[in-house]
Amino acid sequence: MFKKIGDFYKSRNLGMRQVLSNISWLFFDKILQMGLGLVVGVWVARYLGPTQFGLLSYAIAFVSLFNPLISLGLDGIVVRDLSRNPEQKYEIIGTSFTLKLLTGFLVILLAIYLTFVVNSDDIVSRLLITILSIGSVFKSSQVIEFWFQSQVQAKYIVIAKRIVYLGISLAKVLLIQAQATVIAFAIVSVAEVVFSSIALMIIYQIKGNKINLWKINLNRAKLLIRDSWPIFFAGITVYIYSKIDQVMLGSLLEDTSELGFYSVAVKLSEMFDFLPMTINSSVLPKLTSLRRQDPEEYLKKYQSYFDLMLCLWLMVAIPTSLLSPWIINWLYGESYASSIPILSIYVWAQFGSNFGVARSSYLLIENKQKYSLYFSLSGALINIVLNFYLIPRMGAIGATIATLATYFFVTILINFLIKDLSQIKIFILNVLNPIGIINRFKELLK
């Protein structure tokens, strides 16, 4: 079997081998993170209990609402520009790093201010949010990841970040043994961001790159912002409709254990989100190049990309939904039994992640990023309205239904309402034909 795999790998062209190698490294990274994260995460959830775990989840969700501000919508743009113009890497990286660094400091100030407004009587929540927001500054080092992604060299990101992750996981285990408070777990979460930033810089230097050559160019900054602003605003609204459910559960209900049950189901459902993200980070540079070289082949490859996203979704959703009672009871115990119906429903919403990632890359390559803003604005509005209505009446189940309905509209239905997105509509309609999927996969593997 291994010989056949090796022969298949060698028979591919250089570009395909780079993609396969890159995906392999990213899969190894995420499987390691998923396995270790599941074990340690379950241990932490059991130790803290639904109420304290819900409180920590609320603080994490609150701070994560500011992630789009740190990103500035630059992530895909920077990878794209580095793929097109690698000789300008120091200018692109230096400028994007500076932009992210400045917004990181702004996020700290905003988070601290808003937590005093929203959680004026909850000292623990304010402290957790303040601590977690500090990591925003160090996320500016993500620009180093973008360089390695643009060169389809994910293994260096894996090496740097997983060494840190192993150490942080050990630290969490030690905190449990020491009977530490929830505050200590927030501090360790920030430490992971700090040390990951340092590790990325070290390996970037080791590979012959020079941080001291980074430079800031105002014209480059204007170009980056010009291309990224639709993605930036879309990112804000995407985070609103993807994370606001947890924030609203923590705010609208006095019992934070309900958020604890919901957070467990969400964490398990999203555990395989690395699959579409991993594949996307590897194929985006190649699809970008193929779009210029052979537009017809580019559309064929993109259809196969959508086919793969459908298969990955079903491979995760079906067994997770059916086995949800066994999964929850075995991992978290009877105290989290209320998570079972939430997980069995919520996992089906993951089609939003799979198709959403594929569609976002298509919009980026085709310079149609403006639609991302329309999608996310409508999604945010729908999700907030549904959550306000359903959470007080149905609790976490209400938030789950709101998420499922929002993703269906924003990821699937809206493509049929906009004429300029007819190609995405074709991609989606084609994945409904299983025979067509099989034939396209056969063609791809020839």
Image (tube, rainbow, N blue to C red):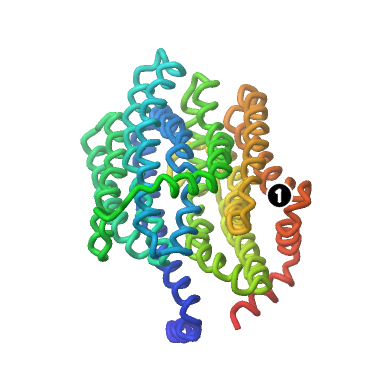
Residue 27 in view here:
no
Residue lying at 40% horizontally and 20% vertically, measured from the top left: 113
x and y percentages locating residue 299 in the rendered image? 67, 68
Residue 174 in view here:
yes
- Look at the image and tell me in which quarter the C terminus lies: bottom right
x and y percentages locating residue 47 in the rendered image? 34, 36
x and y percentages locating residue 225 in the rendered image? 50, 44
Residue lying at 35% horizontally and 53% vertically, measured from the top left: 36
Q: Secondary structure at mark 1?
A: helix
Q: In the visual, does 177 lie left or right of 100? A: left
Quadrant hosting residue 56: top left
On screen, 227 above or below 275? above
Q: Disc 1 marks which residue?
A: 412
Label 1 packing within 10 angstroms: few (<14), some (14-19), many (20+): some
Comparing 413 with 176, the one in front is 413
x and y percentages locating residue 67 in the rendered image? 45, 38
Q: In the visual, does 358 lie left or right of 429? A: left
On screen, 329 above or below 162? above
Q: How many marks?
A: 1
Residue lying at 27% horizontally and 55% vertically, measured from the top left: 213
Q: Amino acid at mark 1?
A: Ile
Comparing 387 with 359, the one in front is 359
Residue lying at 62% horizontally and 29% vertically, measured from the top left: 384
Q: In the visual, does 377 lie left or right of 417? A: left
Quadrant hosting residue 252: top right
Comparing 366 with 178, the one in front is 366
